[in-house]
């Protein structure tokens, strides 16, 4: 399959992954329902680290942990309220309020990132994800995703096979070459390399464009340390994992996840993120076969609507496939891409893999 095929992948694809407690990767509407059922995240040490998040939610939504585990709570609303209050505090120069909100925002983001990352180790336990990885590795399409997790990457790695049977973590397919951009630094299994890595390794022609960032992308923060000043703003791709580390660091240098949190007012102005959106438009402008899996086009994400409307201004699709139990998105998507032919609709990943 050529690069005129594009997959758009949302969080719904991950629902075929299950951890050892029977939990699926969380969505924005069930994040707290899920994390509060995880034994690992109820440890005394962890609860102390994130208690300010639960206090904040109870203060404004009047929901304690019992409510959160039994009722729907929109994570996007929480991030958005913090965002709006932070903007207001900055405007009014309320330093104490700014510090308080930044701590809550950081704790919530760390909760979100860490919990999502935990599900990566269960990828190979899902036959559907393994089969999907094989399909993608065979087709080599471009992928546009709004997921922060690295589940698709892990499934492709497994499908590609090992370079050397004696080295269990060296795969034929190298994920650092898949993102469409070059990182300032790469840290894999504790080994650091700079951009010279790309002199020997060319970026793949088929890309995974993560428009909301990724759990394995980090940026050095501008803090008042000489070593950090030298690295300030550099973006790192790393396989390292952290647990209850505030803030995350590499060799003592402070780093922050490069992700666009689930807020109403999303900022895509970071250089790396902006570059990915440009590349996504290039891919979609040449796309003839569009496959959308597990993404429902929420009304708050107008960025993707704008992207599709502009990409298909002068481009006509030949085939549209939608994988989603919610069939209401069919008419929405057909309008966005100006498609008037029959659509292949599959209720889940299993049906899609069977039909392709």
Image (spheres, rainbow, N blue to C red):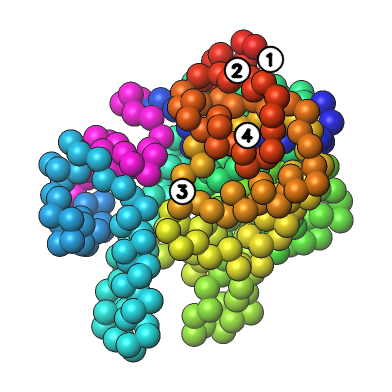
Judging by the rendered image, the residue that carries numbered circle 1 is: 356
Circle count: 4
Asked if marks 2 and 1 touch (Cβ < 8 Å), the reply is yes
Judging by the rendered image, the residue that carries numbered circle 4 is: 334
Query: What residue is shown at x 37% (from left), y 83% (from top)?
Result: 90
The alpha-carbon separation of the residues under discs 2 and 4 comes to: 19 Å
* Residue 48 in view (yes/no): no
Say whether residue 22 is magenta: yes
Judging by the rendered image, the residue that carries numbered circle 2 is: 352
The alpha-carbon separation of the residues under discs 4 and 3 comes to: 16 Å
Q: Is residue 308 above or below residue 268?
A: above
Residue at the extreme bottom: 93
> Does residue 313 appear to the left or right of 191 in the view shown?
right
Judging by the rendered image, the residue that carries numbered circle 3 is: 299
Span highlighted in magenta in the image = 20-45
Q: Is residue 82 above or below residue 86?
A: above
Viewer-nearest residue: 199 or 1: 1
The alpha-carbon separation of the residues under discs 3 and 1 comes to: 30 Å
Query: What residue is shown at x 79% (from left), y 55% (from top)?
Result: 197
């Amino acid at each position: 399959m050529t690069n005129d095929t594009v997959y758009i992948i949302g969080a719904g694809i991950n629902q075929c992954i299950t951890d050892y407690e029977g939990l699926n990767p969380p969505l924005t509407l069930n994040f707290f329902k899920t994390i509060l059922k995880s034994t690992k995240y109820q440890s005394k040490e962890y609860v102390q680290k994130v208690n300010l998040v639960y206090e904040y939610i109870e203060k404004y939504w009047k929901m304690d942990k019992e409510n959160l585990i039994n009722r729907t709570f929109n994570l996007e609303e929480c991030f958005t309220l913090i965002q709006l209050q932070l903007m207001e505090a900055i405007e009014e120069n309320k330093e104490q309020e700014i510090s308080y909100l930044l701590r809550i925002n950081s704790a919530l983001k760390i909760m979100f990132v860490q919990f999502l990352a935990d599900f990566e180790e269960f990828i190979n336990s899902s036959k559907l994800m393994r089969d999907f990885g094989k399909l993608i590795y065979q087709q080599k399409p471009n992928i546009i995703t709004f997921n922060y997790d690295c589940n698709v990457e892990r499934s492709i790695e497994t499908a590609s096979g090992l370079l050397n049977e004696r080295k269990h973590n060296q795969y034929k397919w190298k994920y650092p070459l898949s993102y469409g951009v070059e990182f300032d630094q790469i840290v894999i299994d504790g080994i650091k390399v700079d951009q010279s890595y790309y002199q020997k390794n060319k970026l793949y022609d088929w890309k995974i464009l993560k428009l909301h960032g990724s759990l394995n992308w980090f940026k050095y923060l501008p803090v008042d340390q000489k070593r950090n000043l030298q690295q300030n703003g550099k973006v790192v791709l790393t396989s390292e994992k952290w647990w209850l580390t505030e803030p995350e660091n590499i060799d003592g240098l402070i780093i922050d996840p490069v992700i666009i949190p689930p807020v109403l007012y999303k900022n895509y102005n970071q250089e790396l993120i902006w570059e990915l959106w440009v590349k996504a438009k290039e891919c979609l402008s040449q796309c003839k076969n569009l496959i959308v899996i597990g993404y429902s086009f929420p009304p708050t994400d107008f960025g993707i609507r704008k992207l599709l409307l502009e990409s298909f201004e002068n481009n006509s699709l030949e085939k549209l496939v939608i994988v989603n139990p919610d069939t209401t998105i069919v008419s929405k998507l057909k309008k966005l891409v100006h498609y008037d032919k029959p659509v292949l609709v599959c209720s889940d990943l299993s049906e899609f893999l069977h039909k392709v």
